[in-house]
Amino acid sequence: MKDTVYGSSNVLIRVYENDLLNRSHYERMLQANSLEEAINVLRETPYRNDVERIKEDNDYDSMFMNELHQTFDELLKIVPNKELIELAGLRYAYHNLKVLFKEELTNQDLDHLLIPIGRYETSELRQAVRMKDTEVLPAAYLESIKEVQDDYDEYHNVQAVDIILDRRYFTHLRLLADETKEDELPKLVETYIDYQNMSTLIRGMRQGKKRNFLLTVLSSSGSIPKSDLLDIAENGYQYALQYFRSTDYRKIMEQSIDNETNDVSTVKLDQQTDNAYMELMQGARLQSFGPMPVLAYLYAKEIEVKNLRLILSGKENGISADAIRERMRLNYAQ
């Protein structure tokens, strides 16, 4: 798709970016003496209309989900390449598929866990899960659904739902990146999958997971061969550091080392990969055309929500400003 088709939508994106919370907002919330005082800072932001309600019930999660829902819906209306928004919101669709399968397989009502974000309505996903067929969803969704159902029919293991759909999500994500016909996106998505594989790998190593388990949960859609990741798991943290020092991910891995144990910290690794991805997105500030400003804004909004949740949860639980700050992600706005 020609870069110029994003001209009008990118103009609106620049306007929306002015409403993103900046460093000053976060710092004032961090320095607040109470949860209520931190929430009051939001009176100056797009979250202003929800301030009184969340001061009464402390249900800030619903406010954040509503904000993300409105953001994705608005961009679906104005961005000409719908696959771009579908790609950005695909993880919510796969979260919903997990919930819907568990509803079907356990006869529970899990409607409260559904997240109404994405290109396709949750009702369409539910219909596809129930009927194993669809006239609306693209084939990749149905392939994921059938793989889960076939596995359950054979092994009757509900826990496998998450494992299969997590792996299928990355396969689908890479497919969508190609379908957008945007030259920048396959490499961007490949990098994102590498980050997720690194996190999954280190978590698996810390939990003592065996090779067969890691073979199942790691994605083949990134740039790092799955065979290399499995070798790392068998050879330990020092081998991991040695391996990644020869890649573009050297800095991320080195900054994820726990100073006390000299092992790789999963908490630090998740923070470092989120920040590295944000640095890629911040390059979109220099672009007037093309798809990157759209993706960057959506990611910025998601990180904003993650940071706000960290701050408000921290204030609610009496965690110090410094401890909260250490876990916050790099901000898109200054």
Image (spheres, helix red, strand yellow):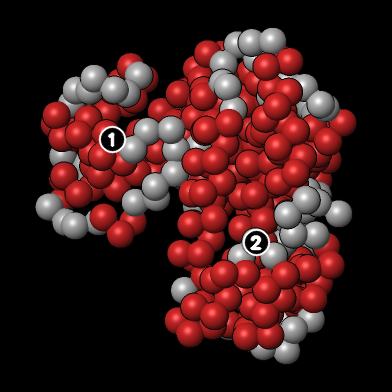
Compared to residue 148, the image places residue 299 above or below, namely: below
Residue 46 tag number:
2
Q: Is residue 240 visible?
A: no
Determine the image quadrant of residue 180.
Answer: top right
Residue ID at (73%, 15%) = 4
Farthest bottom residue in view: 33
At label 2, which amino acid type do we have? Pro
Res 226 → quadrant: top right
Secondary structure of residue under mark 1? helix
Of the pair 49 and 27, the residue shown nearer to us: 49
Number of marks in the image?
A: 2
Which x, y percent locates residue 68? 54, 51
Query: Relative to 55, is 252 above or below?
Result: above
Q: Position of residue 159 (x, y in %)?
A: 28, 46
The residue sitting at 83% across, 62% down in the picture is 23
Q: Which residue corresponds to mark 1?
A: 125
Label 1 crowd bin: few (<14), some (14–19), many (20+), radius 10 Å: many
Report the quarter where the N terminus lies.
top right
> Residue 18: percent from the left, percent from the top?
78, 51
Residue visible at 80% across and 59% down? 22
Eye-nearest disc, 1 or 2: 2
Residue 310 rendering spot, x and y as whole percentages: 63, 67
Relative to 89, 32 lies left or right: right
Residue at figure coordinates x 58%, y 82% from the top left = 316
Q: Earlier in the sequence, mark 1 or mark 2?
A: 2
C-alpha separation, residue under disc 1 versus residue under disc 2: 30 Å
Position of 139 compared to 12: left or right?
Answer: left
Element on which disc 2 rests? loop
Q: Nearer the viewer, residue 331 or 120?
A: 120
Kind of residue sitting beneath label 1: Leu
> 63 or 234, which is in the foreground?
63
